[in-house]
Amino acid sequence: MNQRKAVLPMSARYLINAALCLALILGLKGLSASGLLSDYFTKILILVGINIILAVSLNVATGYLGQLPLGHAGFMAVGAYTGGIFLKSVNAAAMSGAPLVLTIAAAILLSGAVAALFGVIIGVPALRLKGDYLAIITLGFGEIIRVVITNIDSVLGFDFTYGASGLKRIPKFTGALNVFLCVVMTCLVIHMVMKSRHGRSILSIRENEIAAESCGVNTTFYKVMAFTMSAFFAGVAGCLYAGNLGSLQPGGFGFMKSIEILVMVVLGGMGSMLGSVVSATVLTILPEALRSFDRYRMVVYSAALILMMIFKPSGLFGDYDFSLSRILEKLGVGKKPAGKEDAR
Amino acid sequence: MAMLEVKDINVYYGAIHAIKGVSFEVNEGEIVTLIGANGAGKSTILKTVSGLLHSRTGSIAFQGENIAGMAPHKLVGKGLAQVPEGRAVFLRMTVEENLEMGAYTRPNSELAPHLDRVFEQFPRLKERRKQVAGTLSGGEQQMLAMGRALMSSPKLMMLDEPSMGLAPILVDQIFGIIQTLHQSGTTILLVEQNAQMALGVADRGYVLETGKLVSSGTGTELLKDESVKKAYLGG
Ligand SMILES: Nc1ncnc2c1ncn2[C@@H]1O[C@H](COP(=O)(O)OP(=O)(O)O)[C@@H](O)[C@H]1O
Ligand SMILES: [Mg+2]
């Protein structure tokens, strides 16, 4: 539907994007091979990546759809435990016939899928109602999931989540490289959906639900779709988180974690993917850089939020988004269509 | 057979009985108006026809097909467009993007000719096509909402108080546009508080009072009707 005249042909832009990603991957590989990338630094990169996925996925539901989910950590928990249990059981069954890469990919996709399923289960009743029911329902969901995980340590005699004592000895597969790939895939998929007709439908609901409906948009379907997509990628992040730590405690997925992710989105600017990426990066690195300041993190978060609400309510980037073709346009690559845009 | 045939609908908001056994019809090529004071139930009727609300009884037929209980997004494809109350435009989208949304149910190939037609009807929108809808004036937003509904090339267009909150000169303009649309073959169901203007352009009208139809007739008949004069035309 988008009428914006492309400055560069689609294929060229994909090529440039792919080349940039490849360069980054090779750079990462080179750095870690040369030993310049310390273990500590790699750990932080991994955390940054996971938080980017969490923030970018939450931005779909808050920024693009205009809802206020308060249980993103719940979907992350579902993904983390799905991935953890899956990898453990695959390992236990010693089904190492499949190459490792495939097992990891399967774990990540499965985690996303199970989280998405929960997204549908919660989204359908909550989003069919007009009004702000989603905030309350997701808030409840996040807490319920945590309590359930804590309490069902075994199912029918099989060890399941190991309850409060935690799920341990999960194969630690998460590295800077596969996190990076997941970040790229997440951003790419969300970007492509949002640029499509489906994305326009989701945005129109945010702008005016009644008008969207009167244009023929199936609002319930698209609300559930956006919410489910948001849950899917939270699940992916959860799986990476499980593979990073190697053990899971239900306590790590509480309400505060959901709020932490929400703060990243709000500070970055609701509806800006770039904003989510930048603010997730900064808010992950900052406490690491200033270790002693970690205990004041929540205070600083609240203060930053309040200041932001006062001075720039739309967040750092508003709903501005990064556009490669716009930058190329500024640099003079690819001629702008002459005169006024498309003369009809 | 009437294009739109509403029979004996009863609509409730919880325990509130908002529409009490209303029946009316709109024939092809007509402008029909529903007039009534604030809170009479005009918007409720339109929302029921467009599927946003549901009637407990009766039937709603559009071109012979029963559409009661059908989801609103399906009706657009059938040729029933609604311009909701209060200039419901997509504020952060441009004028052009708003209009594109209006053609949501149409194939992409129809986009350009429809856009041309709407711009011909609303030259003001053409000037502002790249402007964000939130920066338009009230009258321009109303035109945009109407233009957007036109983009689906509806057979029947339902307008909910298009003159609400507009300066008199803009009201004249909006009614002028409604007449032009009508002349170009669109059937119109117009809901208004501004009885004088609405009855002036309408072929037929119905008068609604607290959820009930109290009288009906041609536009000119109703303009002369003593009780209508008293209640809606300031004596
Ligand atoms: N969402 C709602 N909940 C409860 N009552 C409502 C609601 N919307 C409208 N009503 C009531 O229904 C009646 C008709 O309202 P409405 O159709 O909006 O009137 P009109 O469009 O003629 O001004 C009014 O008495 C109003 O108070
Ligand atoms: Mg009304």
Image (cartoon, rainbow, N blue to C red):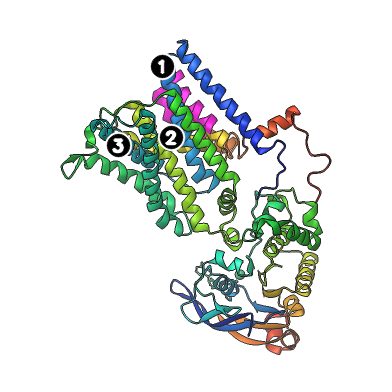
Classed neighbour count for the residue bearing mark 3: other residues with Cα under 10 Å, few (<14), some (14–19), many (≥20): many
Can I make out residue A94 in this image? yes
The amino acid beneath tag 2 is: Glu
> Element at badge 3?
helix
Q: What residue is disc 3 on?
A: A86
> Element at badge 1?
helix
Q: Main secondary structure of the magenta part?
A: helix
Asked if labels 2 and 3 share a chain, the reply is yes
N-terminal-most mark, 2 or 1: 1
Where is residue A339, by image quadrant? Answer: top right
Residue A184 x/y as whole percent:
51, 32
The amino acid beneath tag 3 is: Phe
Classed neighbour count for the residue bearing mark 2: other residues with Cα under 10 Å, few (<14), some (14–19), many (≥20): some
Quadrant of the image where one finds ligand 1: bottom right
Say left or right for A195 vs A67: right
Asked if labels 2 and 1 share a chain, the reply is yes
The amino acid beneath tag 1 is: Tyr
Subunit of mark 1?
A
Q: What residue is disc 2 on?
A: A260
Residue A24 x/y as whole percent:
54, 22
CA gap between label 2 and label 1 equals 22 Å
> Element at badge 2?
helix
Point out the stretch of residues depicted in magenta: A277-305
Subunit of mark 2?
A
Residue drawn 30% across the image and 36% down it: A86
